[in-house]
């Protein structure tokens, strides 16, 4: 229910609304595909951990980036050593979300000895990690950090990050140039006054840039 919605991007949406002097009414988009499809939208802006890409930018507009989103590695509880490098991950059982950037990163940078376990939802991926069906889960670092912060006793530590130089942006309907410029300006002010950093720290409980890089 959007009434009870909470999280980094909910807080950021409200902060942007405050900067623009506009009330925020939350709308739940049922389909990620539809969110990024060309054409009219039932909302003005969307924040949904969306990575900026040229392909997506041909169908919708993006704000300036508001968060770096390298890939993160989340350990199962009880897993000790063996996650300090990409080579070390090769022998582990890896979980990921089907259709995400993580799947390409696993294939191109890790090249595991066994096929990764791909799930159709975060709930299933995290349950597999919790019960030990895989040793690590790989996904966007901010997403994994938020999930671990919410359920700290279910999982191990964030083992590191795999640099992909992805960035999250606010999604707008294509052609919404005036609104995009206003959102960009609002994000600039939130970065300058420290509010963006405070929101990020509150929900991630870590600085993404300080997470060790896996090579």
Image: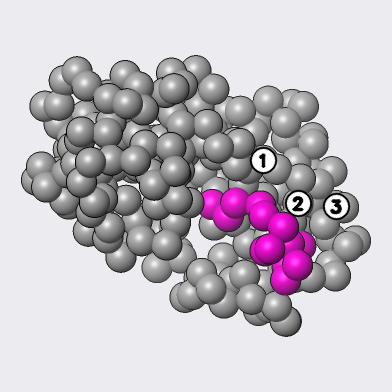
Q: Which quadrant would the C terminus be assigned to in this image? A: top left
| Label drawn at residue 66 | 1
| Mark closer to the chain start, 3 or 2 | 2
Residue at the spot 43% in from the left edge and 18% down from the top edge = 212
Question: From where the camera sits, is residue 109 visible?
Answer: yes
Between label 3 and label 2, give the one nearer the viewer: 2
Question: Residues under labels 2 and 1: Cα distance?
Answer: 8 Å
What kind of element bears circle 3? helix
Name the foreground residue: 49 vs 79. Answer: 79
What kind of element bears circle 2? loop
Range shown magenta:
49-61
Q: Residues within 10 Å of mark 1 (few under 14, many from 20)?
A: some
Whether the residues at callouts 2 and 1 have beta carbons within 8 Å, the answer is: yes
Q: Image quadrant of residue 135? A: top left
Q: How many marks?
A: 3
Question: From where the camera sits, is residue 150 visible?
Answer: no
In the image, is residue 89 above or below residue 28? above
Rendering coords of residue 32 (x, y %): 51, 69
Question: Residues under labels 3 and 2: Cα distance?
Answer: 9 Å
């Amino acid at each position: 229910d959007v009434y009870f919605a909470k999280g980094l991007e909910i807080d950021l949406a409200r902060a942007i609304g405050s900067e623009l002097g506009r009330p925020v009414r939350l709308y739940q988009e049922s389909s990620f595909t539809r969110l990024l499809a060309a054409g009219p939208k039932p909302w003005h802006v969307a924040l949904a951990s969306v990575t900026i890409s040229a392909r997506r930018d041909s169908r919708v507009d993006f704000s300036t980036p508001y968060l770096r989103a390298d890939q993160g590695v989340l350990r199962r509880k009880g897993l000790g050593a063996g996650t300090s490098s990409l080579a070390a991950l090769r022998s582990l059982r890896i979980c990921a979300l089907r259709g995400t950037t993580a799947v390409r990163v696993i294939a191109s940078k890790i090249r595991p000895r066994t096929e990764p376990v791909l799930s159709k939802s975060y709930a299933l991926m995290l349950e597999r990690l919790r019960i030990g069906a895989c040793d690590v889960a790989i996904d966007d670092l901010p997403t994994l950090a938020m999930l671990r912060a919410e359920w700290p006793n279910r999982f191990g530590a964030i083992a590191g990050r795999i640099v992909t130089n992805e960035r999250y942006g606010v999604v707008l309907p294509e052609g919404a140039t005036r609104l995009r410029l206003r959102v960009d300006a609002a994000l600039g002010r939130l970065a300058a006054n420290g509010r963006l950093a405070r929101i990020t720290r509150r929900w991630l409980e870590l600085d993404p840039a300080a997470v060790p890089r896996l090579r």
